[in-house]
């Protein structure tokens, strides 16, 4: 890095100076002429890295992962028109995940706004829905206030803020800054807890209940010790939401798994058998998995989330850790463990059943006869990755079946992290988020669990790994289909249509891009391949051909799903697709 110049000449210089003083270390994006002033200021100052991606959507996802891991504001940028339009999907994910990200959206020259100019859009309208703050700087004098307000909004409201800057404004003479940018810009986290009457009401509810289950989400970060104390005092099983897996599940003798469509039968049962459900830091969205007759209390830092998914008996606003520290002294410790022990016993059986599916043993058919080469089960692949990965590894998971296997088979330990598109549910998030995670922590192992559909959608950014020298490890679940969509079709009684992927040899393609890569089709070769790829010092890819017909059973199967799947089997046979039904049985039953 070169030493920072003291002279601020242009608006772009002032932007870079403000970001630098706020601790920003990198900006993700793709250059363009409307960003020339900014990139020149970055080059001249030399204190902030430009992470050159190959698609702006990747820039936004990467910034989001950077922020989630660091807990700090991250920045991405897009040039005018198509450049900043490409940011939108990734910014939606950041915003819905409540991740502080500042997006710099360049715009056409001010004199041309409204003229239908080349690459002109209306960015204020485009970004309004995926941001807390979105304003255009039409004059140099606006810049300090708009930029600092945007940063405050992103940090203080936990989400996206967008600053729109026409290219000619960025070249204008810089105004005089009136207030030091760090004054109140990045405040410390406040202590927020409910008032005493509300805490007393929650304590009375819990003290008067017999079968309490805790549902814990991402908002429980930093409250692990308090959660265990609470579960012990109440003799309560803990069900974790997907967003809470890496902050709740580890070293937790009360955890009984997840509920929901990709959850455990034990998590579902613990929710349905309770007389009181306490929701902590979660906005679990699936109403059909909430108990119908239990009393429900919820603690969340966001008032607007209280009662959004279910009818509440009590809603409290506060950080989970602050709230529990104030609540614990008010509780009467319970001695009856029947509800907890039943949930733990159920979880042990559910965990055993899931682990039995994570095998690379030879396949068997009727009467124990071998049926030929065994497909690689994605459960087995994920288990091996979890066992071989570093103790402080960061995992990113594509939406769809990679998220299912990550949720069920990755082992968390308090140091590992798991990031995905849990709320927005976008394809192609894993590698893009891995780029951000690896950029923020170059010496930490980062593993992208990529579906073949999601990987192919943004696979041009393999070249980013090479160019930026990012040692990201990519594991491609190559099942030749949009797997989760195919399962949904079957469950609804439809024949799979439009889901098949005619994939190339991803390993050969990665080697052509200059990466170390291995392709595996035999489960006997898988363990060595996983260790080879994860141990490689640079970027590496594992192209693993996994079973297409692998089913992910939900914790509860309703009559409509049984009817739908039976209808699928009938339609498949009558349409001449009986081989698909046999493959389905071979993959899931004869093992």
Image (cartoon, rainbow, N blue to C red):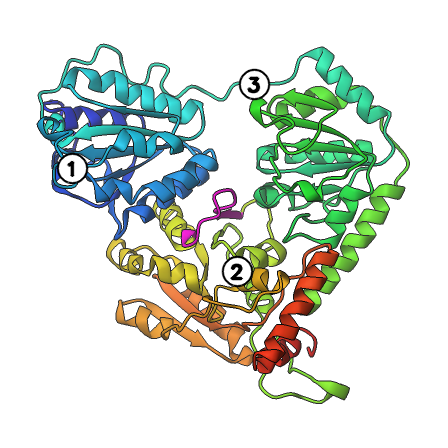
Residue at 73% x, 11% y: name it.
Answer: 197
Badge 3 is on which residue? 191
Q: Nearer the viewer, residue 264 or 453?
A: 453
Query: Which callout, 2 or 1, points to the residue nearer the camera?
Result: 2
Residue 485 disc label = 2
Q: Is residue 50 visible?
A: no
Secondary structure beneath label 1: helix
Locate residue 306 relative to residue 116 in the image: left or right. Answer: right
Residue 35 disc label = 1
Name above or below for residue 284 compared with residue 207.
below
Residue 292 image point, x, y percent: 78, 37
Magenta stretch in the rendered image: 416-429
Spatial separation of the CA atoms under disc 2 and disc 1: 39 Å
Q: Is residue 151 visible?
A: yes
Spatial separation of the CA atoms under disc 3 and disc 2: 43 Å
Residue 181 image point, x, y percent: 28, 18
Spatial separation of the CA atoms under disc 3 and disc 1: 40 Å
Q: Quadrant of the C terminus?
A: bottom right
Name above or below for residue 40 compared with residue 563.
above
* Residue 404 lies within the magenta run: no
Q: Main secondary structure of the magenta part?
A: loop
Residue 155 image point, x, y percent: 41, 26
Query: Which callout, 3 or 2, points to the residue nearer the camera?
Result: 2
Q: Quadrant of the N terminus?
A: top left
Name above or below for residue 33 compared with residue 22.
below
Mark closer to the chain start, 2 or 1 = 1
Mark closer to the chain start, 3 or 2 = 3
């Amino acid at each position: 890095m070169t030493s920072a110049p003291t002279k601020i000449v242009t608006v772009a210089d002032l932007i870079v100076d403000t970001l630098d003083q706020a601790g920003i270390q990198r900006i993700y994006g793709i250059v363009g002429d409307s960003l020339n002033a900014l990139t020149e200021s970055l080059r001249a100052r030399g204190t902030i890295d430009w992470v050159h991606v190959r698609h702006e959507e990747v820039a936004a996802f990467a910034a989001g992962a950077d922020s989630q891991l660091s807990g700090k504001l991250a920045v991405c940028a897009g040039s005018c028109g198509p450049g900043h339009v490409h940011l939108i999907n990734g910014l939606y994910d950041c915003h819905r995940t409540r991740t502080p990200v500042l997006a710099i959206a360049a715009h056409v020259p001010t004199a041309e706004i409204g003229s239908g100019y080349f690459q002109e859009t209306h960015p204020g309208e485009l970004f309004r829905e995926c941001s807390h703050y979105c304003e255009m700087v039409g004059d140099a004098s606006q810049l300090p206030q708009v930029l600092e307000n945007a940063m405050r909004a992103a940090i203080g409201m936990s989400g996206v803020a967008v600053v729109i800057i026409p290219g000619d404004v960025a070249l204008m003479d810089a105004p005089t800054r009136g207030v030091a940018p760090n004054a109140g810009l990045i405040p410390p986290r406040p202590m927020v807890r409910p008032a005493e009457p509300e805490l007393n009401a929650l304590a009375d509810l819990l003290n008067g209940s017999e079968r309490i289950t805790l549902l814990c989400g991402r908002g429980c970060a930093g409250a692990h010790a308090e959660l265990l104390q609470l579960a012990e005092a109440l003799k309560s099983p803990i069900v974790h939401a997907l967003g809470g897996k890496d902050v709740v599940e580890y070293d937790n003798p009360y955890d009984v798994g997840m509920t929901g469509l990709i959850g455990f039968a034990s998590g579902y049962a613990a929710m349905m058998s309770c007389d009181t459900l306490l929701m902590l830091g979660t906005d679990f969205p699936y109403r059909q998995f909430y108990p119908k007759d239990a009393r429900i209390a919820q603690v969340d830092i966001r008032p607007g989330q209280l009662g959004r998914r279910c009818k509440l008996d009590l809603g409290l606003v506060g950080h989970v850790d602050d709230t529990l520290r104030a609540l614990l002294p008010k509780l009467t410790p319970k001695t009856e463990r029947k509800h907890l022990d039943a949930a733990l016993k159920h979880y042990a059986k559910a965990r055993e059943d899931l682990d039995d599916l994570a095998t690379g043993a030879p396949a068997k058919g009727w009467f124990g006869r071998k049926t030929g080469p065994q497909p690689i089960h994605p459960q087995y692949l994920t288990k091996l990755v979890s066992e071989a990965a570093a103790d402080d590894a960061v995992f990113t998971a594509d939406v769809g079946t990679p998220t299912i296997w990550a949720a069920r088979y990755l082992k968390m330990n308090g140091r590992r992290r798991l990031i995905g598109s849990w709320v927005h549910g976008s394809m192609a998030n894993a590698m893009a988020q891995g780029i951000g995670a690896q950029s923020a922590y170059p010496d930490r192992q980062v593993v992208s669990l990529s579906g073949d559909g999601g990987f192919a959608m943004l696979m041009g950014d393999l070249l980013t790994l090479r160019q930026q020298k990012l040692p990201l490890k990519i594991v491609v679940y190559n099942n030749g289909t949009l797997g989760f969509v195919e399962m949904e079709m079957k469950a609804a009684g439809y024949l799979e249509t439009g889901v098949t992927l005619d994939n190339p040899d991803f390993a050969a393609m990665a080697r052509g891009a200059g990466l170390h890569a291995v392709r595996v089709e035999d489960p006997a070769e898988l363990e060595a391949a996983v260790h080879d790829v994860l141990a490689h010092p640079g970027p590496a890819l594992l192209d693993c051909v996994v079973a297409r017909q692998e089913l992910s059973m939900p914790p509860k199967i309703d009559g409509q799903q049984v009817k739908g799947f039976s209808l699928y089997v009938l339609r498949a046979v009558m349409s001449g697709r009986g081989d698909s039904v046999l493959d389905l049985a071979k993959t899931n039953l004869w093992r």
